[in-house]
Amino acid sequence: MQLISTALISLAAAGVALASCDEASRFGTFSITPTTVKSGDTITGNLNLSCAHSYAGIYPKYIDYYIEVPQNNNGHEAPILLAHHEPAADALTDTFTTQVPYATYFNAGYDVLAQLTYAVDGEQPDSTYYVTGGVFAGISITPTVSN
């Protein structure tokens, strides 16, 4: 009876963890600080992978962070790589700190993408392949004018 009680408590705890994660957090939850910057400013990104692990079973091999133009913007700017990480398999968080590159920005909102590359089991035994998915955080970049 003791074993059954312990098992039920464990299942209930796991259910609470899964219930607190929604589909939108399957790649984690991501934030950038500060959110209004200019070229040369320091930014920090924090990615919490708890829901990616517990809800979606995603354990990233690589995490790449990019500044991207949102779909409703001009769309003519290539993504800018901010950081590339190879986290430990069981890492629950990932953080980066970097300077906003001196690129051409228009006075507009941008997205910072945390792109996760992770393994998925293939159709054949012992086969895996890699896919990507990600989560965005908004950022506003003010252009820097130099003479």
Image (cartoon, grey):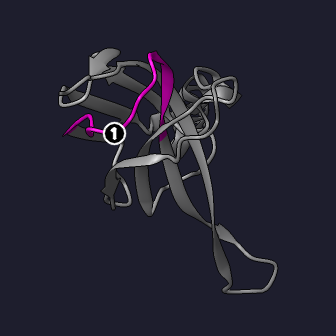
Disc 1 is placed on an element classified as loop
Residue 44 located left or right of residue 62 = left
Residue at 74%, 76% in the rendered image: 122
Q: Position of residue 6 (x, y in %)?
A: 52, 35
Whether residue 114 is visible here, answered yes or no, is: yes
Q: Residue at x 53, y 59 (%)?
A: 117
Q: Is residue 112 magenta?
A: yes
Residue 17: image x %, image y %?
Answer: 54, 27
Amino acid type, callout 1:
Ala
- Toward the viewer: 27 or 34? 34
Give me the residue at 64% from left, 36% from top.
75
Q: Position of residue 66 (x, y in %)?
A: 43, 44
Q: Nearer the viewer, residue 58 or 130?
A: 130
Above or below for 1 versus 13: below
Q: Quadrant of the N terminus?
A: top right
Residue numbers of the magenta segment: 98-113
The image quarter containing residue 92 is top left
- Image quarter of the C terminus: top left
Q: Is residue 139 left or right of residue 56?
A: left
Q: Quadrant of residue 132?
A: bottom right
- Residue linked to disc 1: 103
35 or 108, nearer to the observer: 108
Horizontal relation, residue 145 to residue 17: left or right: left
Q: Answer above or below: position of 117 versus 143.
A: below
Q: Is residue 3 visible?
A: no
Residue 61 percent location from the top left of the image: 44, 63
